[in-house]
Image: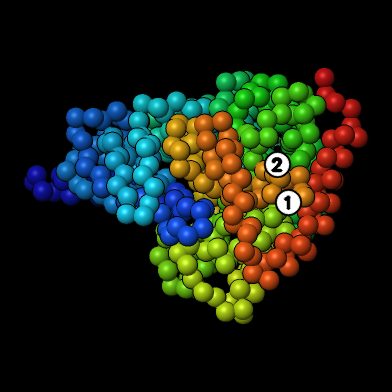
Amino acid sequence: MQQCWLTELKMAARAAAPYPIGSPFISPQPGLSCQSKRVALKLNPHNPPLRGFSALKAASGITREPGNSFFGKDSFAALMGASAVPTTRKQNRVSQYRFNPRASHYKVTILGAAGGIGEPLSLLIKMSPLVSEVRLYDIANVKGITADLSHCNTPAQVRGFNGTSQLADSLRGADLVVVPAGVPRKPGMTRDDLFSVNASIVKGLIEAVAENCPQAFIHIISNPLNSTVPIAAEVMKQKGVYDPKKLFGVTTLDVVRSNTFVAQRKNLRLIDVDVPVVGGHSGSTILPLLSKTRPLVTFTDKEVEELTAKIQNAGTEVVEAKEGEGSATLSMAYAAARFVESSLRAKDGDADVYECAYVQSNLTELAFFASRVKLGRKGVEALISSDLQGLTEYEAEILEALKPQLKANIEKGIAFVQKQPAAA
Ligand SMILES: NC(=O)c1ccc[n+]([C@@H]2O[C@H](COP(=O)([O-])OP(=O)(O)OC[C@H]3O[C@@H](n4cnc5c(N)ncnc54)[C@H](O)[C@@H]3O)[C@@H](O)[C@H]2O)c1
């Protein structure tokens, strides 16, 4: 009987933590090898601060591999109501970060929460032990999703906000705002074709962010990202509250795809692979730096060309496979949840968080550029320039070739805001 009870609890624990989502903690510094932090977790039955996960806490005595967590190693510790003590390999930096589950006090607002991306993203954020409140805002269909999601017994409270009259309330006091609002691509469309609709949507929403939670981290997902991030920056500037360290274009999906495709091609463990992706977020402006892949892998010229094309066209592959029903939603929600989790971990004091993102940048002559960034309590702490050194001839050529298009996309976004009168 006792055995049967324990088995059920172990199964519950496994069911709640089946997939890795977190960054594999790769050092951006050249010369350092893969930095997967190894964490041996001993569950502590006397320290169950997250009562929403009571089935998990009862599984005390199981030593678990943190790579199994939805949200990565440190969050896994919080889910399990235990303290994670990272032990590192000889050559790795020692992380001072100690995860404190009581720090689950971040309020996250999703603008466009009822959409193809917004809905699964809401679920993933509801599962984060770092989040105390998840706020769902949309112009339609929020009520049902709010009721549905609120029944999950994870700690975050769920609040729904429907329509523009409730937009300000959804934003006041938010620590992080994610913006997947807008229309997705249909077959035959480029991301730039979405500009006419999504530019206005993003502009309007960011005006509300500027007025109600200017200190929040802002994660823009809405395409065309190359232009919508400059739009958001201009709006924040007009309102006098622009902090470039806190505005991000979410390009995590390009990294997630690159890691997946390289791991498949080279028969590597997915969790070990990290490919920095730089440039922009549309077709040929996406530049995966395969030569900087960790762990070190060698590719033939043919492999590089095929993988680069596959990564650049991965979004279009999904759009075509969905035959008019939209673009990537599940993989995008997964990638966005990873970026939210990384940002909140950095906000919470983890001093070892790196992600690629499209941000204001001085790494090239372009005003906005995706690169690996170090995240900290106040947003971007550093742009990692080392990835752009020692590029292969092929990568250097693509980098130069993408610049005119990315520049035009950036200027289009800026001009869109500047030619309109500033909102009061
Ligand atoms: N950054 C990326 O890597 C990436 C990947 C995939 C898709 N996208 C983009 O994300 C966006 C959303 O995609 P989706 O598949 O979820 O689309 P969707 O149409 O399924 O959902 C969009 C949601 O936004 C809502 N919305 C529209 N106008 C709004 C407004 N003014 N305020 C609040 N909500 C509003 C809609 O009601 C809808 O619920 C698209 O622009 C798409 O191109 C980005």
Is residue 325 visible from the viewing direction of this image?
no
Snapshot colouring: rainbow
Q: Residue at x 57, y 25 (%)?
A: 174
Hey, which quadrant is residue 128 in on the image? top left
Q: Which residue is mark 2?
A: 360
136 relative to 45 in the view: left or right: right
The picture places residue 62, in percent across and down from the top left corner, at: 19, 47
The picture places residue 190, in percent across and down from the top left corner, at: 77, 58
- Secondary element at tag 1: loop
Most foreground residue, 299 or 141? 299
Q: Residue at x 64, y 40 (%)?
A: 248
Any atom of ligand 1 within 8 Å of the CB at mark 1? Answer: no
| Disc 1 residue type (three-letter) | Thr
The picture places residue 126, in percent across and down from the top left corner, at: 46, 36
Q: Residues within 10 Å of mark 2 (few under 14, many from 20)?
A: many
The picture places residue 220, in percent across and down from the top left corner, at: 66, 41
Circle number at residue 364: 1
386 relative to 91 in the view: left or right: right
Q: Residue at x 66, y 47 (%)?
A: 358
| Disc 2 residue type (three-letter) | Gln
**Quarter of the picture holding the C terminus:** top right
251 relative to 223 in the view: left or right: left
Distance CA(mark 1)–CA(mark 2):
10 Å
Any atom of ligand 1 within 8 Å of the CB at mark 2? Answer: no
Most foreground residue, 97 or 342? 97
Hey, which quadrant is residue 394 in on the image? bottom right
Most foreground residue, 147 or 178? 178
